[in-house]
Image (cartoon, grey):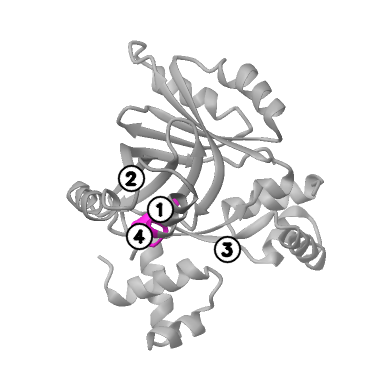
């Protein structure tokens, strides 16, 4: 279980994952050795998984971002597995999520422009197996995207 | 910005793990450390690398439930959108807010400790937001990020 100091460390790292141990130790009023031990414990427990960079796809010329909400034909017994395996092969799919609710799967798709989107949608997405229904939500603006936890 | 094969290799490596040192990354790619550093800096300056995110296991950190909400505004107009965005962005449990075109006006990602906690957040914080109309909730079961077209 996380205690208050662990949570403070994670809060600080959420703001800046590159913050060094001595600096973290000073911020929480501890020693570098103790902070290192806490971070190691959280890594071993699988709470702290590391960090990754965020790519801004617009800067690479992908101006269109679409969220595809997909309902699968659940009468086919392996519909989920077969759909997911095929969806992973579409390079423009950057996120795959499965849900409990009205929607079964959501794909985050990026495209260079609307013509490119239409090509990907027709040639790659509509070819995916077991789709019963698709709805598209087009991203107009991202207002908040830090995805940090309210620790 | 257009990328060459080395830029792509650097991005793929950093998307998987941004904790590795430039020295280690350089060794893996067969580049010199300064050359690797220059390329990373160039990718940052071009805005391709938009920042670094801590990766936590939400469930193990005490947030067992992630819900995606589709929200339709009951009243529209510039003021309603701005009011809604300001208010929803300030809720700590709301991790992301996207303005979308389609069946809903906004797509929110919300975390909670469990379903009871989610119900509290939904009732007290989300349903009371200015202008909220219809809301659809889908509980996240699994999630994977793909490297994308790099």
Q: How far apart are marks 4 and 2 (CA)?
A: 15 Å
Q: In which quarter of the image is residue A88?
A: top right
Q: Do labels 2 and 3 share a chain?
A: yes
Task: Give the mark, 1 or 3, whose residue is nearer the N terminus.
Answer: 3
Pointer 4 with pointer 2, Cβ within 8 A: no
Whether marks 1 and 2 lie on the same chain: yes
Q: Which mark is residue B132?
A: 2
Residue B50, relative to residue A5: is it above or below?
A: above
Chain letter of the residue carrying label 4: B
User: Contact (CB < 8 A) between labels 4 and 1?
Assistant: no
Measured Cα–Cα span from mark 1 to mark 2: 8 Å
| Within-10-Å neighbours for mark 4: few <14, some 14–19, many 20+ | some
Of labels 2 and 3, earlier in sequence is 3
Kindly report which numbered mark, 1 or 3, lies closer to the viewer in this rendering.
1
First-in-chain label (1 vs 2): 1
Residue highlighted by disc 1 = B84
Q: Find residue B37 and report its horizontal and vertical position in percent.
A: 76, 66
Label 4: state its secondary structure.
loop
Q: Which of marks 4 and 2 is in front?
A: 2
Using the image, tell me which numbered label, if any, was put on residue B91: 4
Label 4 close to label 3 by CB (< 8 Å): no
- Residue A43 x/y as whole percent: 41, 63
Residue nearer the viewer, A19 or A45: A19
Q: Mark 3 points at which residue?
A: B19
Q: Which class describes the residues within 10 Å of circle 1: few (<14), some (14-19), or many (20+)? A: some
In reply to whether residue B41 is colored magenta, the answer given is no
Q: In the rendered structure, which segment of residues is drawn in magenta?
A: B87-96
Viewport quadrant of the C terminus of chain B: top right
Alpha carbons under labels 4 and 3: distance apart: 29 Å
Q: Do labels 4 and 2 share a chain?
A: yes
Q: Which of marks 4 and 2 is nearer the N terminus?
A: 4
Magenta run includes residue B94: yes
């Amino acid at each position: 279980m996380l205690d208050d100091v662990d949570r403070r460390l994670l809060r600080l790292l959420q703001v800046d994952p590159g913050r060094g141990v001595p600096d973290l130790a000073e911020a929480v009023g501890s020693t570098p050795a103790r902070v290192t031990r806490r971070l190691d414990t959280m890594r071993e427990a699988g709470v702290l998984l590391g960090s990754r960079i965020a790519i801004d796809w617009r800067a690479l010329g992908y101006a269109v971002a679409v969220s595809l909400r997909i309902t699968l034909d659940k009468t086919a017994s392996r519909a989920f597995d077969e759909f997911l395996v095929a969806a992973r092969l579409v390079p423009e799919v950057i996120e795959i999520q499965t849900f409990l609710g009205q929607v079964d799967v959501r794909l985050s798709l990026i495209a260079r422009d609307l013509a490119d989107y239409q090509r990907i949608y027709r040639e790659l997405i509509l070819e995916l197996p077991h789709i019963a229904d698709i709805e598209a939500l087009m991203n107009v603006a991202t207002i908040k995207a830090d995805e940090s936890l309210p620790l | 910005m257009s990328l060459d094969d080395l830029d792509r290799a650097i991005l793929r490596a950093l998307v998987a793990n941004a904790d590795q040192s430039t020295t280690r990354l350089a060794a893996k790619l067969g580049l010199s450390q300064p050359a690797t550093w220059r390329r990373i800096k160039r990718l940052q300056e071009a805005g391709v690398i938009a920042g670094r995110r801590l990766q936590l296991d939400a469930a193990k950190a005490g947030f067992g439930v992630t819900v995606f909400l589709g929200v339709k505004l009951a009243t529209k107009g510039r003021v309603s959108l701005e009011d809604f965005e300001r208010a929803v962005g300030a809720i700590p449990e709301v991790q992301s807010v996207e303005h979308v075109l389609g069946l809903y006006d906004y797509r929110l990602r919300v975390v909670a400790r469990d379903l009871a906690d989610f119900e509290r957040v939904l009732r007290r914080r989300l349903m009371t937001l200015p202008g909220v109309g219809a809301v659809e909730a889908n509980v996240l079961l699994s999630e994977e990020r793909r490297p994308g077209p790099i």
